[in-house]
Image (tube, rainbow, N blue to C red):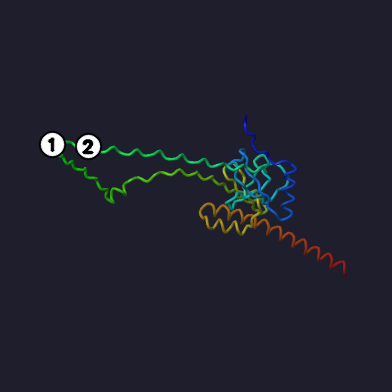
């Protein structure tokens, strides 16, 4: 009989999570086998829900991690996985006692056999022994996208593999300029050029508004006379 998998979050459970967050609590959830990039059955705490409730709108922090990741309802569950019982290790087989050695007798004389000399390993030979290769989990590639508008507004978003972990967020032009100076080269030139062009457009807009304000003040003074 096939084992039933965990149930994904329902609408009622999502509303329960929202109520818990509004009360200042961080409800616990677990990852289903549909979750990408994490082990099924691992626990996490919900830190926020983004609007609207569709796609990867549930922000969670996996247990033992400080990262906040986005998931959908079918990747999370409130069904706590059962603990796996640790199977007892088999008892070691009894070591048979060695049979007593019979001396070799030749013409009623006891023949003494020399024990072979054990070769000693020098420190140089020990250092040449290749270490055991340990398999390591390959890190997920991170993509950081920086975008700007014609008015000089900047946004940044982060994507881990195929999953967007940080949705587009506003970032100040000063922070962008500081990052460009740290990177240097063509990156600094391109970003400084975009900031300079946005600065010229904003200055032209300020000059236009100041001219319109001066004309309005003059018209007001003429009406007051």
Mark 1 surroundings within 10 Å by alpha-carbon count, few (fewer than 14), some (14 through 19), many (20 or more): few
Q: Which of 128 and 108 is in front in this view?
A: 108
- Give the vertical position of 44 relative to 95 (above or below): below
| Tag 2 residue | 102
Distance from the alpha carbon under mark 1 to that under mark 2: 13 Å
Q: Quadrant of residue 38?
A: top right
Which residue is depicted at the point 53% across and 42% down? 86
Q: What element carries label 2?
A: loop
Read off the residue under disc 1: 108
Examine the rendering and report whether any part of residue 144 can be seen.
yes
For label 1, the SS is: loop
In the foreground, 117 or 88: 88
Residue 25 position, x and y percent, is 70, 54
1 and 2 marks in contact (CB < 8 Å): no
Side (left or right) of 197 relative to 137? right
Specify the quadrant that holds the C terminus. bottom right
Expressed as whole percent of the image width and height from the top left, the position of residue 197 reads 63, 55
Q: Which of marks 1 and 2 is nearer the N terminus?
A: 2
Residue 115 vertical position relative to residue 205 in the rendered view, above or below: above
Q: Is residue 43 left or right of residue 184?
A: right
Residue sitting at the far bottom? 225
Q: In this view, does 189 lie to the left or right of 93?
A: right
């Amino acid at each position: 009989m096939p084992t039933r998998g965990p149930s994904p979050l329902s609408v009622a459970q999502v509303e329960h999570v929202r109520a818990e967050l509004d009360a200042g609590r961080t409800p616990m959830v677990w990852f289903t086998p549909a979750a990408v990039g994490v082990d099924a059955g691992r626990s996490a705490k919900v830190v926020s829900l983004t609007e609207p409730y569709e796609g990867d709108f549930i922000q969670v922090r996996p247990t033992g991690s400080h990262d906040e990741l986005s998931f959908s309802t079918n990747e999370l569950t409130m069904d706590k996985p059962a603990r796996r019982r640790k199977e007892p290790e088999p008892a070691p087989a009894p070591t048979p006692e060695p049979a007593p050695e019979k001396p070799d007798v030749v013409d009623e004389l006891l023949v003494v056999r020399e024990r072979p000399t054990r070769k000693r390993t020098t420190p140089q030979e020990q250092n040449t022994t290749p270490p055991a290769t340990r398999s390591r989990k390959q890190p997920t590639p991170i993509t950081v996208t920086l975008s700007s508008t014609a008015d000089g507004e900047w946004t940044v978003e982060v994507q881990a593999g195929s999953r967007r972990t940080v949705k587009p967020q506003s970032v100040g032009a000063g922070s962008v300029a500081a990052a460009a100076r740290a990177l240097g080269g063509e990156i600094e030139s391109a970003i400084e050029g975009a900031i300079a062009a946005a600065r010229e457009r904003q200055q032209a807009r300020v000059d236009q508004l100041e001219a319109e304000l001066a004309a309005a003040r003059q018209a007001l003074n003429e009406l007051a006379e």
